[in-house]
Image (cartoon, rainbow, N blue to C red):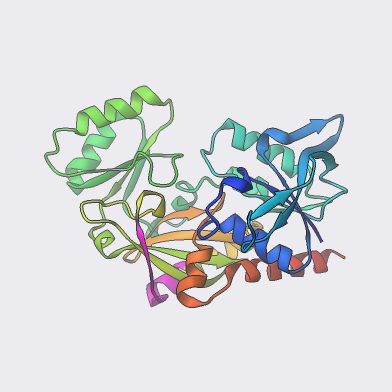
Amino acid sequence: MRIAFQMDPMEEVDINADTTFALAEEASFRGYELYEYSPEHLIYNEGLVQARARKMHINRNGKEHVTFEERKLINLALDVDVVWMRQDPPFDMSYITATHLLERLCAHTLVVNDPKWVRACPEKILPLDFPELMPETVITRDRLSIDKFRSKHKDIILKPLYGNGGAGVFLVKEGDSNYSALIEMFMENSREPLIAQAFLKDVEKGDKRIIIIDGEPVGAINRIPQKGEMRSNMHVGGLATSTDLTASDLYICEAIGPMLKDRGQILVGIDVIGDKMTEINITSPTGVQELKEFTGIDAAALAWDAIERKLGNKT
């Protein structure tokens, strides 16, 4: 198979943590032909969706973990079998434009995850389809509504609606004098609504990342926040540890799994604190290498197995 990764530059990734590297490494092991390009190299040109891509060779144990051939123009409808959309957010108009262009390939090339639904399912909005599974939440720019929500729940989390990696996430405790300044900062820096959620004290025990492949949960890791920190994202120093899937985890996965499968979301990472789901990550979910390290479960291999099944069903 011929695979194109639309991603941030491969030469800059942490090969011991990056999920895209794990996916590319498994693809290389299977003998697939690999290409890499960044979103700025994506082109719509007179009916064709193209990319100025580099053929890529992966070698974890080599002097360089990746080497490239000269960049060339490829037709993403004819020259590759799969496009992996794996660039990191922010989920902005650049990201949305890429989903529109890649959606035009879907009659010819398998795009993972399905770009139509990536665009239609922002990661903090998609859980709203399952209100019984998530913390109490308000999404708005209306200050009075946020004030009322805070009065009800006392301690709340404030975060940007389209943020990622724990950036801009604040715990606002009852009586916190920084509350008004934080609201003003959010309002001044963006025209978007912000999201407020009831604080879940179980976060002290960790924020579980559950990996779902083609609608089925395959395993999980727990991410423990550092002392004095309530964010558990590994981008901000959260410590990954082993964990098991609980009955409530499986209940959540059974509720959302069919929807994810129907919408072509091959690799998904959901975040669960206690028995509540806080996010459904479908843009470029992480945690695959940590899952393999702690449990032996190879989610990269399982993802490629699912892709091979899909391509086999199309022939």
Near-viewer residue (46 or 18): 18
Residue 157 inside the magenta-drawn segment? no
Residue 245 inside the magenta-drawn segment? yes
Q: Quadrant of the C terminus?
A: bottom right
Q: Which residues are magenta?
A: 238-252
Near-viewer residue (275 or 101): 101
Answer whether residue 219 is visible to the viewer in this image.
Answer: no
Residue most toward the top? 188
Q: Report the residue at 73% width, 63% height from top.
A: 28
* Residue 134 coordinates in the image, percent (x, y): 37, 57
Q: Quadrant of residue 95?
A: top right
* Residue 131 coordinates in the image, percent (x, y): 40, 55
Near-viewer residue (194 or 2): 2
Q: Report the residue at 65% width, 66% height from top.
A: 303
Answer whether residue 232 is visible to the viewer in this image.
Answer: yes
Q: Report the residue at 68% width, 33% height from top.
A: 40
